[in-house]
């Protein structure tokens, strides 16, 4: 009686190779998904009056200047959670207003920062991107007073003053610097920094610890080209901040870090728990499948070899023909 022949097939890849290949693919897909989701939040805007802009009206120079002075980069508020954090309440928040900023976002900042030291910097210039130089901009003209007064009116009951300053030097904590071109100022009897009698450049509100810098040419990138103005910018911030080096810049007013979509909802609380549960369930189902299914079995022959197979086939044919009952009497004793 011959043994039944069993044919097996070789696996093209080992289980370990297959597992690591699938794991690497899933990891790459997850990385691509996260980068695609959060890349817009970390993309720096080109030009404009933002803390990330390296254009003349931007404030990246001030951020770097504070970083070198305090030996640590000042934090950036990218969302309302950052503005509401207990740590942020101890910082002087610098809010740089651009002509295209969101008025609703400014109102949220005013509400969240009530009772906390905040410096608002008004816009001044109209600019446009400089072709051939990424992040650069060229100055077109000064913003109309109506535009600046619209932003100023959201902070205080005041308007820009008319007329040129009567002095050519400004005193900032004992340091005298040149008056910026086309100076913006407001009338105030008790200014923190003034360009002559009653012409305030830096003023404080009566009912809130809010400060308004009417002319950004004292602290923006163009101003920091002058060593005296660069030093005066630090003196002014040191005069306002509640603690040494405690300065934070706002990015929410410029829409940075505020883009919400379905992809973010999947990877942020409270839906992050649901996403992780689905991923764990999928991983368990995959591991269960690896243990349940093995290599494919080879298909056997239709008619096997050997005498036993011949007897079994004959018996099957007799059974189907209905001859088994009559066959037994012939061999009975």
Image (tube, rainbow, N blue to C red):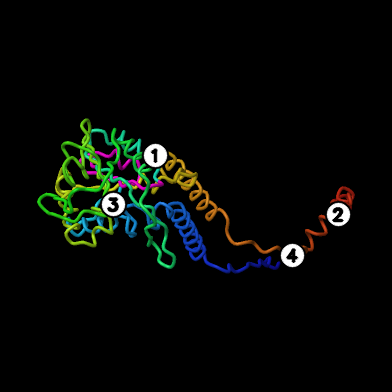
Q: Is residue 333 visible?
A: no
Asked if the residue under mark 4 is in contact with the one under mark 2, i.e. CB atoms within 8 Å, the reply is: no
Q: Say which of marks 3 and 1 sits in front.
A: 3
Res. 301 mark = 4
Residues in magenta, as a range? 78-100
Circle 3 residues within 10 Å: few <14, some 14–19, many ≥20 = few
Q: Where in the figure is residue 160, as x and y percent of width and height? A: 29, 41
Q: Dot 4: within a 10 Å radius of its alpha carbon, few (fewer than 14), some, or many (20 or more) residues?
A: few
Say what secondary structure mark 1 lies in. Answer: helix
Residue 182's tag is 3
Q: Residue at x 19, y 60 (%)?
A: 68
> Is 41 above or below relative to 210?
below
Mark 1–mark 4 distance (CA, rounded to whole Å): 80 Å
Q: Which residue, given by chain and number where applicable, does mark 2 sit on?
A: 318
In the rendered image, is residue 135 in sight? yes
Nearest to viewer (mark 2 / mark 1) = 1
Magenta residue check for 91: yes
Q: Position of residue 202 (x, y in %)?
A: 21, 44
Mark 3 or mark 1, earlier in chain: 1
Residue placed under numbered mark 1 in the picture = 103
């Amino acid at each position: 009686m011959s043994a039944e022949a069993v044919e097996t097939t070789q696996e093209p890849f080992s289980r370990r190779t297959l597992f690591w290949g699938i794991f690497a693919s899933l990891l790459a897909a997850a990385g691509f998904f996260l980068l695609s989701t959060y890349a817009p939040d970390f993309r720096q805007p080109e030009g404009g009056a933002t803390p990330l802009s390296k254009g003349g009206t931007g404030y990246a120079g001030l951020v770097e200047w504070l970083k070198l002075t305090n030996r640590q980069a000042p934090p950036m508020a990218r969302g309302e959670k950052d503005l509401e954090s207990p740590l942020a309440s101890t910082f002087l928040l610098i809010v740089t207003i651009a002509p295209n900023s969101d008025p609703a976002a400014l109102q949220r900042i005013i509400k969240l920062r009530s009772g906390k030291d905040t410096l608002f910097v008004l816009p001044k210039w109209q600019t446009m991107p400089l072709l051939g130089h990424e992040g650069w901009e060229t100055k077109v003209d000064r913003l109309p007073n109506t535009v600046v007064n619209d932003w100023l009116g959201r902070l205080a009951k005041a308007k820009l003053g008319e007329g040129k300053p009567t002095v050519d030097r400004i005193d900032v904590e004992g340091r005298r610097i040149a008056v910026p071109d086309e100076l913006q100022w407001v009338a105030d009897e008790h200014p923190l920094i003034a360009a002559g009698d009653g012409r305030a450049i830096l003023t404080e509100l009566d009912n809130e610890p809010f400060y308004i810098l009417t002319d950004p040419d004292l602290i923006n990138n163009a101003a920091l080209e002058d060593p005296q103005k660069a030093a005066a910018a630090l003196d002014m911030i040191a005069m306002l901040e509640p603690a040494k080096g405690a300065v934070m810049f706002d990015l929410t007013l410029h829409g940075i870090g505020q883009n919400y979509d379905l992809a973010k909802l999947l990877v942020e609380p409270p839906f992050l728990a649901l996403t992780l549960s689905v991923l764990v369930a999928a991983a368990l189902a995959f591991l269960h499948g690896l243990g349940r299914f093995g290599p494919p079995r080879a298909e056997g022959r239709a008619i096997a070899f050997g005498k036993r197979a011949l007897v079994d086939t004959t018996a099957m044919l007799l059974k189907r023909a209905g001859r088994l009952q009559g066959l037994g009497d012939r061999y009975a004793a």
